[in-house]
């Protein structure tokens, strides 16, 4: 898979985390105020996209910049995801995507589905958690022993799943979206396998349980 990074525009992000998470020479897209965060982290973006209603910084010369209309079909972050997919990047890590307005966070969660429908895999990443979408198939997680994770059906009324290598194993369990029983499972052992037999699941891995 070809990997890139998007810096979204959530307020008050962990700048040190962004700086340390993005490797040198990575392909980086900034969604509107994401450029302010990139500048603070001393990261030069490859592409800047937005309607610039929340970014007051002067945009740099020599960087591909796409200016959107204020009234548009998708969010700035989704436009960044779409641009990355068009450029052949199918593994996308989005930083500064949570912790601000709840509606913006929910929009970013649903952007995971947008990317998956187009062949991409997106992870919303912060120091606290990694959020991704599990589509139909088998998903393996290594070396997570002791960390908690939660699962929620998304884009469907119910998902059918099996789990092994976790504190609460399941065998073809029918998980209805109206009953959020998938909160706070725990990885146990070196490997955990989650099989999604139908539907899709939002997965939240708590990377640092000191926040619990």
Image: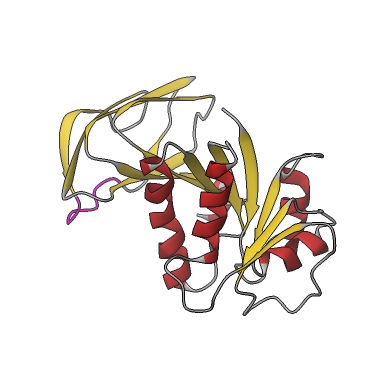
Q: Is residue 179 magenta?
A: yes
Residue occupying image coordinates x 75% and y 68%: 36
Q: What secondary structure characterizes most of the magenta part?
A: loop
Image x and y of residue 11, in percent: 63, 72
Left or right: 166 in relation to 125: left
Image x and y of residue 132, in percent: 45, 43
Left or right: 98 in relation to 111: right
Image x and y of residue 82, in percent: 51, 50
Q: Is residue 209 magenta?
A: no
Left or right: 36 in relation to 115: right
State which quadrant residue 26 falls in: top right
Q: What's the coloring here?
A: secondary structure
Whether 161 is drawn above or below 40: the answer is above
Closer to the camera in the image, 29 or 177: 29
Closer to the camera in the image, 141 or 132: 132
Magenta region: 177-182
Task: Please say whether residue 51 is visible from this viewpoint.
Answer: yes
Image x and y of residue 200, in percent: 28, 41
Residue occupying image coordinates x 50% and y 28%: 145
Closer to the camera in the image, 12 or 92: 92
State which quadrant residue 195 falls in: top left
Q: Quadrant of the N terminus?
A: top right
């Amino acid at each position: 898979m070809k990997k890139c990074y998007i810096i979204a525009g959530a307020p008050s992000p962990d700048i040190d985390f962004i700086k340390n998470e993005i490797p040198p020479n990575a392909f980086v897209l900034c969604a509107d105020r994401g450029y302010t965060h990139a500048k603070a982290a001393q990261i030069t973006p490859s592409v800047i996209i937005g309607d610039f209603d929340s970014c007051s910084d002067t945009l740099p010369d020599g960087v591909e910049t796409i200016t959107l209309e204020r009234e548009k079909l998708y969010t700035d972050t989704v436009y960044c995801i779409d641009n990355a997919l068009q450029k052949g990047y199918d593994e996308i890590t989005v930083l500064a995507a949570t912790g601000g307005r709840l509606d913006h966070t929910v929009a970013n969660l649903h952007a995971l589905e947008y990317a998956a429908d187009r062949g991409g895999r997106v992870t919303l990443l912060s120091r606290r958690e990694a959020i991704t979408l599990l589509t139909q198939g088998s998903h393996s997680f290594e070396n997570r022993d002791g960390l908690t994770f939660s699962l929620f059906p998304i884009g469907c009324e119910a998902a059918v799943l099996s789990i092994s290598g976790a504190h609460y194993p399941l065998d073809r369990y029918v998980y209805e979206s109206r009953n959020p029983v998938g909160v706070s499972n725990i990885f146990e052992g070196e490997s955990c396998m989650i099989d999604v037999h139908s539907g899709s699941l939002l997965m939240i891995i708590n990377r640092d349980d000191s926040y619990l």
